[in-house]
Image (spheres, rainbow, N blue to C red):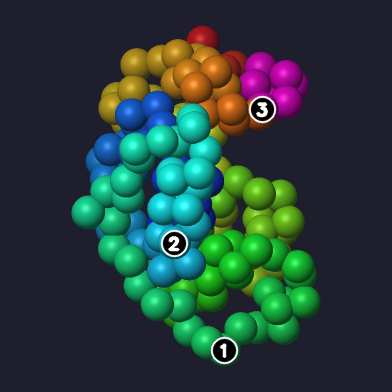
Amino acid sequence: MIVVADTSIVLNLCCVQQIDLLRTLFRRVIVPAEVATEFTRLASRDRRFADLSMPDWIEVRTAPQAIPPEVASAGLNPGESAAIVLCLREAADALLIDEALGREVAAGLGIRIIGILGVLLEAKRHGHLSSVRAVLDRLESEAGFWVAATLRARVLSLAAE
């Protein structure tokens, strides 16, 4: 499976030392150059992401300049827009993104969406992760990742935890 990723999933999984889940679950992980730039900027400015670096096995590609009107008019940040456009160009199997507006725009274009919680559930289902709860706890405490209580309960139920 080929996936294109937005910044938040890569950055947050790196923060809790779980980035290899992406390499284990997906054949290729691609990010647009805008996502790589945003990752580097956040890693240099935000204490919780200090000293993180983009894994060298993640492919960095230039996104097409032509942006569909649905993407251009949505008010997304450059990384989200580039990730959606690159996903379309690469005919990727899915887009890894958590931001609600980006997910909505991508879904409207027929793109399959997987968020970080979906990655954790898939990793557990395939036996690559023993505890979704443990990683969720770390994402919240170390990366500052926020999950609504009802969503957290639903994910933990799906993970049988």
Secondary structure, mark 2, is: helix
Q: Label for residue 83?
A: none
The amino acid beneath tag 1 is: Ala
User: In front here: 55 or 42?
Assistant: 42
Q: Quadrant of residue 158?
A: top right
Residue positioned 50% across, 44% down in the render: 45
Please tell me whether mark 1 sits on a helix, a strand or a loop: loop
| Mark number, residue 66 | 1
Residue 29, percent from left and from top? 33, 57
Residue lying at the far front in this picture: please name it.
45
Of callouts 1 and 2, the N-terminal one = 2
| Distance Cα–Cα, label 2 vs label 3 | 26 Å
Q: Which region is colored magenta?
A: 147-154
> Dots 1 and 2: beta carbons under 8 Å?
no
Residue 29 vs residue 1, the one in the foreground: 29
**Can residue 153 be found in the magenta stretch?**
yes
- Image quarter of the N terminus: bottom left
Label located before the other in sequence (3 or 1): 1
Instruction: Answer with the quarter of the image where residue 13 lies.
Output: top left
Using the image, determine if residue 76 lies above or below residue 67. Answer: above
Question: Looking at the picture, which amino acid does disc 3 mark?
Answer: Val
Residue 52 position within the rendered picture, expressed as x and y whole percent measured from the top left: 35, 40
Is residue 120 shown left or right of residue 110?
left
Among the 4 quarters of the image, the one containing residue 152? top right
Marks 3 and 1 sit apart, C-alpha to C-alpha, by 34 Å
Q: Residues within 10 Å of mark 3 (few under 14, many from 20)?
A: few
Tell me which numbered mark, 2 or 3, is placed earlier along the sequence: 2
Q: Is residue 36 magenta?
A: no
Q: Which residue is mark 3?
A: 147
Name the chief secondary structure element in magenta.
helix
| Residue picked out by circle 2 | 37
Secondary structure under the numbered disc 3 in the rendered image: loop
